[in-house]
Amino acid sequence: MCGINGILGFKGDPAKQIKRMNDAIVHRGPDAEGIWISDDNSIAFGHRRLSIIDLSQNGSQPMISASGDLIIVFNGEIYNYLDIKKQLSDENRNIVFKGHSDTELLLNAIEYYGIEKTLSLIKGMFAFGVYNRKTNEVILARDRAGEKPLYYGKVAGCITFASDLNSIEKIDGFDNGINSHILASYFKGGYIPAPYTIYEEIYKLEPGHFLVLKAPYTEWNDKCYWDIRNVALKGQNDPFRGSFEEASDKLEELIKNSIRGQMISDVPLGAFLSGGIDSTLTVALMQSISDKPVRTFTIGFDDSKYNEAVYAKESAKHLGTEHTEMYVTKQDILDTIEKIPKAFSEPFADSSQIPTMLVSQMTRKHVTVSLSGDAGDEFFCGYNSYKDVRKGLEILKSKLPFVKGNLRKSLGRTVYDLGGKNNATLHKLSTALSVDTAENWYRNVREDDILLDRLAIDKDQYMDAIDKYPDGHLKEAEHNLMLMDMQQYLPDDILVKVDRSGMLYSLESRIPLLDRDVMEFAWTLPLEYKYDGVTTKRILKDILYRYVPKEMMDRPKKGFSVPLSKWLKGDELRSWAEDILASGRDSIKDYVDTATVDSMWKRFLETGNGERNIWNILMLSQWFADRK
């Protein structure tokens, strides 16, 4: 796990520039630094290292291939690198490995197999840049699910790439403007979706994609090597035909195999344990294949509505882990929030970032690598919102069966004009009347819609940003909603949160459920194996109950959330919030109506409603204030 940087065609001192970029991401790689510059100064690579595999100098980067033709900077882990190394050695006896790092294997594989075959072989989380001296090409690549970040774009007449926007901002002459067109998407979801960023001409490389840049490095060619839409369609067209029990057996073995690969580490390793289904299953399977107690970590809150630490402790005791917990104080909250702009480097407003940062900070005091149970909801139908969408459409059709098509949309516009602009309930009703598919319902029936109207933000910009969602791509509504989340919410919210929160404290987070074999098998499963109309994540629960008593886990889903409304209205965060709104006023006035922001804050203090909208505004204001 590391931080990577690169500049192509920079008009200045490349060594000095890369050094500045590296210094901006020391937290991503505190163990060592490396810089490589081409003979003509046209290409410079930078690297900050967090040593996980092969702690010797043989694992240092930027790394040059034995032939001298390829140079790579790599961030992530290749979990099946030992298998590929054996395959490569069997096919080419002349290949000599100096060390045992996955970086060296990746470099040799690219040189021998080429980029596309190598990407088809490797399993893991990764982002890398590689320069081929023979072809004069630079290739940038990102993993299938989007666990590792990779930004790229044009700055001051050069092409750049990096693990973090903080690095790109350090380039001499950086003056890229704010991408105001994407703010509708930010206010809608609380994050900025790929391929966009907060800055003009700077982009996120999308999951499962790679870029090819040829001299003189002014343009790029974007290629997709793994498309979740194709994977989903293929899986559903050729479904698993065994029984539910057979599916559970196979999925259990696949997840175990993934965990075995992800437990390989030359440094201390543990796991997050929230007390929920996914993290408990991950820890249970880790413990089942470990010859010593797994180290587990959780945080708790004094508010019982949000505190899962008691459940995590109970699960840890049952599984026999070495468990550590920490209860959060007011000062912990304030200290964490102050670090959010540095951690995320662009506006990001998923409030579960706070507990994720806190548990990452605590965990890093004990281990360098931690496994998590993320992605279970998206692949195995875990969100209650999936059920709500189907229920909402069914109610709408049963209550208004005679109102169809254009008539229903016209009625929706009428409700909006009569009161939907200012009333959240009428706003939702007007939107519901205007949609006719599960996908459109999922996009639009949100509290945040009314915020876009009040702040005079063009909702069409939001729709433009998410047009990659293929309505009706799959048969069942729930599968389409899961596919929507896997394309955007998972990589652009959940995985951003996990990566940035961990890396702020130099903690590597690994996610076993995002193993390629697990993801592809999950899409072959019939919907009833995931959700039978009553039980969500049915197959994951079936596996878990082989290790943990059902009664221990049989409780309502909470999610990894915080008592945000209580904090913002109380002593914990009210003063901080009002200071942020005041200090960020001048910066955000060109993008949102500050008078509306003031009235929304006042209304929130009076009613407690709209906390998500307020948090979106606060995170945008704090980001701007931090860059003054």
Image (cartoon, rainbow, N blue to C red):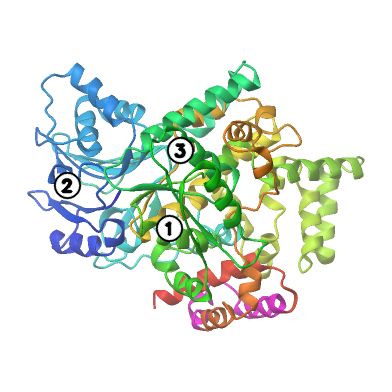
Cα distance in 3D space between marks 2 and 3: 32 Å
Residue for point 53% across, 45% down: 279
x then y, percent, for residue 566: 65, 72
What kind of element bears circle 2? loop
Q: Is residue 54 visible?
A: yes
Left or right, 322 with respect to 476, comes to: left
Residue for point 33% across, 68% down: 175
Q: Earlier in the sequence, mark 2 or mark 3?
A: 2
Name the main secondary structure of what is drawn in magenta: helix
Quadrant showing the C terminus: bottom left
In the image, which residues are magenta? 583-605
x then y, percent, for residue 126: 34, 42
| C-beta proximity under 8 Å, tags 1 and 2 | no
Question: Which amino acid, mark 2?
Answer: Ser
- Residue under numbered circle 3: 287
Asked whether residue 603 is drawn in magenta, I would say: yes
Q: Earlier in the sequence, mark 3 or mark 1?
A: 3
- Residue under numbered circle 1: 360
Instruction: Please identify, in this view, whether the residue under mark 3 or under mark 1 is nearer the observer.
Output: 3
Cα distance in 3D space between marks 1 and 2: 25 Å
| C-beta proximity under 8 Å, tags 3 and 1 | no
Query: Does residue 602 lie above or below 481 as drawn?
Result: below
> What is the crowding at mark 2: few (fewer than 14 residues within 10 Å), some, or many (at least 20)?
many
What kind of element bears circle 1? helix
Question: Which amino acid, mark 3?
Answer: Gln
Left or right, 338 with respect to 163, comes to: right
Per the rendering, the mark at residue 60 is 2
Question: Which amino acid, mark 1?
Answer: Ser
